[in-house]
Amino acid sequence: MNFLVETLQVIFLSFYYYIEVIVRLFISPKRKNVTGEIVLITGAGSGIGRLMALEFSALGVSLVLWDINQDGMKETARLAKEAGAVRVSYYLCDCSDKAEVYRVADQVKKEVGDVSILINNAGIVTGKKFMDAPDSLIEKTVQVNTMAHFWTYKAFLPAMVANNHGHLVSVASSAGLIGVNGLADYCASKFAAVGFAESVALELLATGKDGVKTTIVCPYFINTGMFDGCQTKWPRLLPILEPGYVAQQVVRAVLTDQTYLLMPHSLYWIIGLKNILPVKLGEVLGLYLGAFSVMDSFRGRSKKED
């Protein structure tokens, strides 16, 4: 009897939630008020980290900026204050170092308060074929792109759980959903980040902490310099994304409690196809979309830009 009842419930909810998705295509979801929240952004010294800080600044929040680039953070802080942030604090922090994350997190709690919106944005890429990538760079990629999320969650999630209030944002990548030739270590680190964020979200739901929201962001390549030189085969289908657009969409996703954010929209279809196509046909799709050659002209960010 339980099998029949639960099966019917799943069928009913399937129809209900599909209809809800369709309705939301035409009706903008209600946005929550984040005035007074403490927002911590890692990798805030440049790129979309800086732009997200500026987007949040106009919403009456207190900003906490983390980066390994002191000058970059100072500039972000200056711009954020001009944009209307209530308070801006910045801290030099290497997110790949667990001890440093915990130390700086304790400093933030004492000097600013409990973080209620955590945005794990810091990331790096080696841009080398797997066998050409030095072990040290592979380890660093995993430490920054994956393990840093573990340590920041450990540091700031307890207060969110205690208050049943907060928001966790993982800025991952479309390369965390589908493999890309020439990005083995990066893909592995982003796949891990997505899996970690999904699992923690389920833990929160299972324990009834539905006031702590989660958002997983998976964009295609962004024009920030990190993937300089990369070419997209079909720009209309998979455009190189502009940083300002990405920052706006991430903040919008937080304000509307959107669980998954894929950019561009074509990724929703591509990832769906990847999961249902036969393996050989999936390879044909990857070849068609340029997944085999997108890194061929990779240059990456220059040292001056770093």
Image (cartoon, grey):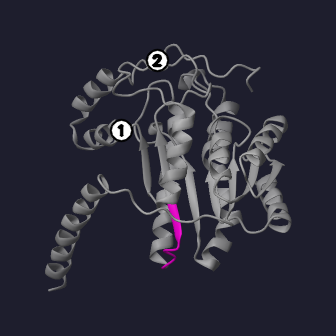
Mark 2: few/some/many CA within 10 Å (<14, 14-19, 20+): some
Residue drawn at the location 47% of the way across and 38% of the way down: 219
| Residue 231 badge | 2
Note whether 146 is above or below 299 in the view shown.
below
Which residue extends farthest top?
Answer: 297
Q: State if disc 2 and disc 1 touch (CB < 8 Å).
A: no
Which residue extends farthest bottom?
Answer: 1
As measured in the structure, the alpha-carbon distance from the residue carrying label 1 to the one carrying label 2 is 17 Å
Report the number of discs.
2
Residue drawn at the location 70% of the way across and 35% of the way down: 46
Residue drawn at the location 13% of the way across and 80% of the way down: 4
> Which part of the image, by quadrant, shows the N terminus?
bottom left
| Residue 17 badge | none
Q: Is residue 278 left or right of residue 30?
A: left
Q: Amino acid at mark 1?
A: Leu
| Residue 267 badge | 1
Residue drawn at the location 29% of the way across and 21% of the way down: 288
Q: Amino acid at mark 2?
A: Gln
Residue range corresponding to the magenta coloring = 208-214
Place of residue 145 in the rendered image (x, y in percent of width and height, measured from the top left) = 61, 43
Q: Is residue 238 left or right of residue 191?
A: left
